[in-house]
Image: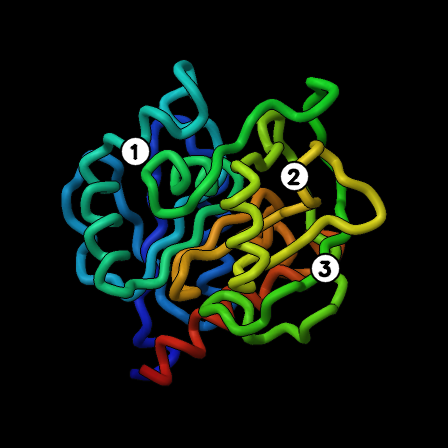
Amino acid sequence: MSAAGARIGVITFPGSLDDGDARRAVRRAGASDVALWHGDADLHGVDAVIVPGGFSYGDYLRCGAIAKFAPVMTEVVRAAGQGMPVLGVCNGFQVLCEAGLLPGVLTRNSGLHYVCRDQWLRVENNTSTWTTRYEAGADLLIPIKHGEGRYVAEEPVLDRLEGEGRVLFRYVEDNPNGSRRDIAGITDERGRVAGLMPHPEHAIDPLTGPTDDGLGMFLSALDTLVAA
């Protein structure tokens, strides 16, 4: 498969905000973007899926709790079980946790304030499908914007994530939301399903974001797809 031949789908739910930016990031990385609709039980032959940020279904019940029942998510869960790379950003991270693709939950920020700013992260794992372009220990500057980004899990789950090297990113200098163990992003056991609260799709060009540090996530996934 060539880079241009790789097809990465981006889901739009009612309330999605960042689907357009996620599709732009896919194109900037060199892949072809495919729009996926929440009500369609069809992934249209894509090679990877991104669940973008926003407020799916208004988040009226609990962030991501309604989106997990969308017909397209049934297909995402099935495809992830077969090894398809899946990335959840912000609300998408919440959806992946609610759908059971990633452990833990995202709760209200400590202090109960919405936060919107540029945030330093540290790369803890550079072997997952979504992080191979980074050096382990590298610091990245990527925007955050959320009110419910406090990652929480039971102690044995946190210990397992740490022990298996499944913490992808950790907040440095300041923890913006009170996440346990400063966790900003995690991956599944195979390193193919990933979720994070910061927005890499908003850091693909210094002209429009603080850096292009986020582009590496999309390039990493493309490398995996081309090599497959």
Please name which of the two marks, 1 or 2, marks the residue nearer to the observer. 2
The residue singled out by tag 2 in the image is 180
Residue 62 screen position, x and y as percent: 43, 20
- Horizontal placement of 6 versus 209: left or right? left
- Horizontal placement of 153 versus 39: left or right? right
Looking at numbered disc 2 in the image, what kind of residue is underneath it? Arg
Picture residue at 32% right of the left edge, 38% below the top: 99
The residue singled out by tag 3 in the image is 122
Picture residue at 18% right of the left edge, 62% below the top: 45
Residue 10 screen position, x and y as percent: 36, 50
Q: Nearer the viewer, residue 56 or 137?
A: 137
The 10 Å Cα crowd at callout 1, few under 14, some 14 to 19, many 20 or more, is many
Residue 13 screen position, x and y as percent: 34, 33
Image height of 33 relative to 70, above or below: below
Q: Nearer the viewer, residue 90 or 100?
A: 100
Looking at numbered disc 1 in the image, what kind of residue is underneath it? Lys
Residue 70, by quadrant, is top left
N-terminal label among 1 and 2: 1
Q: Nearer the viewer, residue 4 or 195?
A: 195
Residue 148 screen position, x and y as percent: 58, 27
